[in-house]
Image: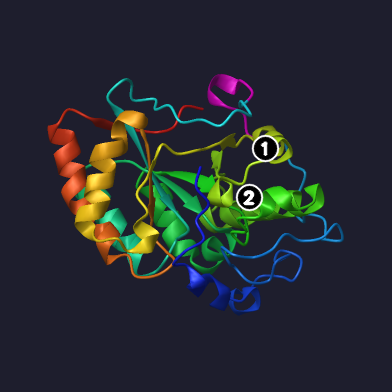
Amino acid sequence: MARHAGGRNWYGKVVGAALGVTMLATGASVWTAQAGPAGASSPKATASASPAAPGKGGKPVSKTIVHASDAGKRGINLTIDDGPDPVWTPQVLDLLRTYQVKATFCMVGTQAQAHPDLVKKVVAAGHRLCNHTVSHNTAMDKASQTYQSQQILDAERMITKASGGVRPMYYRAPGGAFTPYSRTLAASRGMRPLGWNVDTKDFEHPGTDAIIATVERELPNGPTLLFHDAGGDRTQTVEALRTLLPRLKEQGYTFGFPVR
């Protein structure tokens, strides 16, 4: 999985204190896709040790990275990363409602904490939540287990509180920086590690047509599509979805959720 580093310098401008995040929750106090790994002295996670949410039917959640869709052979998993954002998330939600599509929103903890109304709207619309860590550090796989734990568990707490009690069902490591430890920890909390098959590169602003072409070219690689609703101007993302959602449905695809 490609690490998303380019074209996302705005993350470095988002300071945790400005979002009302405690110093403990922001082990890397700046949300940045280019942050270096935290040292072994990183604080322990503040999330409570409540029982893990079980998988479907009460079965344990697998720690393997999931790509498959519960919608079958012609199923698509639409995943939206890095929000919620007050400008772009509502536009994405409007499109999903218009075309009757469900999606999985991989939320950054600080963003969820800053915009709980949007988290609640996502849940109310029938979409699923995914934990995308506190500060979106794409070097998490180089960091200590203490730091990984803080990033995952504190984000789980933030998202769950912002949603009004609905817990994230998946965990997506920033830039795909999974480790055996982070996957095991997430699964123990009821969050299935979530990968992707089609990276639209929408965060690089390649153009609406290029985003559409990437999806159509790479969809045979697997069902999970990666888009973003934060991190900068997402006009191209919104316009690409406006074209892709009805087109893919016309081609016989159905939208589901990643297998749990």
| Residue 31 located left or right of residue 104 | right
Residue at 76% across, 54% down: 147
Amino acid carrying mark 1 in the image: Arg
Q: Please state which of residues 247 and 45 is positioned toward the viewer in this rendering.
A: 247
Residue at 68% across, 71% down: 29
The spot of residue 124 in percent (x, y) is: 39, 49
Label 2 sits on residue:
156
Of callouts 1 and 2, which one flags the residue occurring earlier in the amino acid sequence? 2
Amino acid carrying mark 2 in the image: Glu
Label 1 sits on residue:
189
Measured in 3D between alpha carbons, the distance from the residue under mark 1 to the one under mark 2, in whole angstroms, is: 9 Å
Residue numbers of the magenta segment: 53-60
The spot of residue 176 in percent (x, y) is: 56, 45
Residue extending farthest to the right is: 41
For disc 1, the neighbor class at 10 Å (few under 14, some 14 to 19, many from 20) is many
Q: Secondary structure at mark 2?
A: helix
> Measured along the vertical axis of the image, is residue 37 above or below residue 252?
below
Q: Please state which of residues 174 and 205 is positioned toward the viewer in this rendering.
A: 205
> Measured along the vertical axis of the image, is residue 19 above or below residue 57?
below
Q: Please state which of residues 239 and 126 is positioned toward the viewer in this rendering.
A: 239
> Measured along the vertical axis of the image, is residue 231 above or below residue 246?
below
Do residues under tags 1 and 2 come within 8 Å of each other at their CB atoms? yes
Q: Is residue 227 visible?
A: yes
Secondary structure character of the magenta stretch overall: loop
> Measured along the vertical axis of the image, is residue 29 above or below residue 4?
below
The spot of residue 122 in percent (x, y) is: 40, 52
Q: Secondary structure at mark 1?
A: loop
User: In the rendered image, which quarter is residue 70 located in?
Assistant: top left
Within the magenta stretch, is there residue 141? no
Number of numbered callouts drawn: 2
Residue at 14% across, 40% down: 247
